[in-house]
Image (spheres, grey):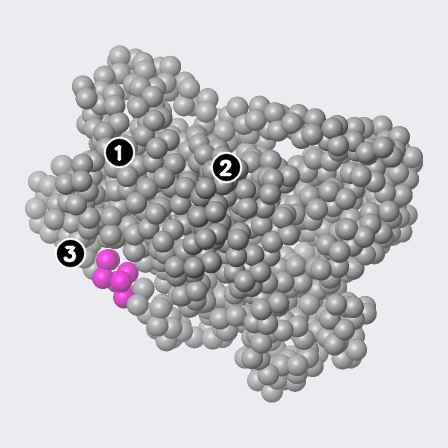
Amino acid sequence: MISKIKTALLVGLTTAGFLAQPALAANYPHKTVKLVTHSSPGGGTDVFLRELIKHLTPITGVTYVVENVRGGAGAKAIAYLAGSPADGSVFYGTTPSYINTSLLSKPDKTYEDLDPVVNLFQDPQIVFVRADSPYKSLKDVVEDAKKRPNQVRVGVSTPGSLDRQVMEQLKAETGTEVTIITHDGGGDVMLSVLNGTSTVGIGEIGELRGQLDAKKIRLITTYTDERLPQFADVPTAKEQGINLVVRKFRGLAGPKGLPRDIVAAWEDAAQKVLQDPKFKAVYEKDALIPSYLNQEQYGKFLAGFAQEQKAFFTKYGITAE
Amino acid sequence: MEGLYYGWQAVTSMPVLLAAIGGVTWGILGGALPGISPSIAMALLLPFTYNLPPLVAVVLLASVYVGAEYGGSIPAILIRTPGTNSAAATVIDGYEMHRQGRGGEALGLSLVGGTIGGLFGLILLSTLTGPLASLALVFTPPAYFALGILGISIIGSLSEGALLKGLIAGVLGLMIATVGTDPISGVSRFTFGNPDLLEGIHFILVMLGIFAVAELMAQAGEERWTEGTKPKTGTTRLRLPSLATLWRLRRAQGIGCVLGAIEGAIPGGGGSVAAFLSYNEARRWSKEPEKFGKGSEEGVIAPETANNVVSATAIVPTLSFGIPGSNSTAILLGGFLIHGLQPGPLLFTTNPEIVYGLFGGLFTANILMFLIGAVILTPCIWLVSRPKPYLMAAIFGLVVSGVYAIDHSLFDLTIVLVAGVVGFIMRKFGFPTLPLILGLVLGYMIESNYRRALLITNGDHIVFLQDGVSLGLLACAALIVGLSAMREIRRMRNPIKLEEAPAH
């Protein structure tokens, strides 16, 4: 019954797409391309992909459909992709969790069963406090934590998130004892900082936008290589002598054995969409850092990332290897 | 007033009106189909909203939410299967009324209760968003823990006559809640290496198994079940409660309104907790508590009012913080974000036409819910009075296809079927099943917030008494447990009543 509704929906969307077919349609072998995410409808990656396809359609002349394959922290979506035809009709919206889930829960199909295609963005990871907090930088936090061990409380999104990892690393690097409080998601961290449960929070600009604009919370540090142009007065952790950079990526992967010309079409489209002024306005608002990587570069990046994660999990006794 | 103007504009705008009609209708149907929760009903519509004007899109989604929260009670009353989590409490007395041939009355109560609850919630939403929003800030981990304990404390009264068995069922629910990823450390627990279990066992699946599948099994096991129990006369039509009846039930409704308002404004509180607590309180304050579980009108209207108040007030934290408190409001938030609207304190000043337009649209949706409900309920009653074998095959088909359609997961189906067998066995041995559901629903909230609270104080339990909200809620919980214990002792001294105790 529901699948019928879904089919009807798909058909409806596809027809709508045909009507809006732009003139510069490229010679892509499919009229409709499915982008799969493990995020639920309305979730971070879901909203991101839906925004992306709005700007991608005019460039490629292809209609895109976002499908949510939830469950198993991404394991299901990976398995689904691994079993799909490698003909360019279906892709997966990647985030670090597809590597982490592969490493932590060791499902039958892992990130290694998929081919990376392109990377589009890095999400800046940021450290924030309530507007009335005395902390001005991460250094203040570390110094306070040294004075008062286990009294500084840092809210992070989920136990398996990169924000949790980076705080564990901070503890190890600086030899401080901060209390890390995990939550069920970024929104909860913000509430936790607002009501004083956590003194410091780790998160992403997109989730905090409303409270940032209302000046209820303040950024004190970014875990990026360079300062964010939108927040030029917020120092990076590196500048403060704390060598931590979070590489939270957003890209695409596909089934193994994607033909070269399809990958090339995506490499071309990805570069174009990142240049699109309308899309730029949207992603710059959330301070996403465009970070295009072609297939070869992306593959290398992912391999390196997976290596770092493996080392982290082993070092902290999360997985035995 | 600018707000009223925008609200009125929305109410009188054709596209918004159409969105409200379509949304509520789809919502009631989605909510009524077992397996399709409000969030799934909304998610299925989400793609349609991309090309709509922003206001029409958010009204459409919010109307689905309102309709679905109500629709869930239809199968709860008619086939002992809650269509949504928050209709689980309605099963107790609603289905009992239906069995007594008062299904039309029960549906009327839930429709009117739901409409009044929805309108009450809407008034709160539009006038008190500021103060209600601060309620979310008052709830720190110790308070959430205490809220969970308060929810659990009603197990005693849900397992009348079988306290020990009720506690066992509750503990079983809590145990199932520990499956999956540890909320604090991230280690996977009791997953036996199966990635399907990483995100835990979703309670909607367990609920469908324990209520729907077990009920089908029990009925199929009855002697000469194919002949069925023909409903008595007078049940084939919807019967709306008279004003006198409503006045008589005012206390139960009031309880539903108050508890629904509070639970809705707290992210993560949710409709099911509100409904269960309202049910319990309605019984405690009732003049005829002995009727509860045996077809009490108050037992239907209290939870039904509460869960519709929640569907309005749950929008408060979403609008004012951009924090969705549930899956449904997460999709509503997605609807906002897709249209470039950023919920948060500034939304009221940057896009008042959307905020007040949404309020206007929700008002329309609640009125429509009443009208549409009044039209479709009579055919629903007719539908469930068909010969049992057809009906039950259809229900089983709906449950199975509904569950499979959500995530295309055979694993989910297995959970539903296993839960069905477990529920059937529990019923055979006189174990009440509601405590298990309650334990499962609240287990995660209790565990994760207990541990978070202790992280804050480095392990000092005094935090639960220092936090005012937590202290108050824990005191209420102690009171409820104390009263149940007293009732139980009285019952043990007077064992005749035990025979009359209904097995849920």
Q: Residues within 10 Å of mark 3 (few under 14, many from 20)?
A: few
Chain ID at mark 2:
B
Q: Which residue is mark 2?
A: B14
The nearer-to-camera label among 3 and 1 is 1
Are the residues tagged 3 and 1 within 8 Å (C-beta)?
Answer: no
Asked if one can make out residue B55 in the rendered structure from this viewpoint, the answer is yes
Residue A249 seen in the current view: no
**Residue at the image point whose x is 81% and y is 68% from the top:** A225
Answer left or right for B300 relative to A232: left
- What residue would you read off at disc 1? B108
Mark 1 closeness class: few <14, some 14–19, many ≥20 residues within 10 Å: many
Bounds of the magenta segment: B474-481
B324 shown above or below B291: below
* Sequence-earlier tag: 2 or 3: 2
Subunit under mark 3? B
Q: Position of residue B40 (x, y in %)?
A: 52, 38
Give whichever of discs 3 and 1 has the lower sequence position: 1
Q: Which residue is pictured at 13% across the width and 37% down the height?
A: B499
Residue A144 drawn at (x, y percent) = 61, 84
Q: Nearer the viewer, residue B79 or A74?
A: B79
How far apart, in angstroms, are the residues tagged by discs 1 and 2? 29 Å
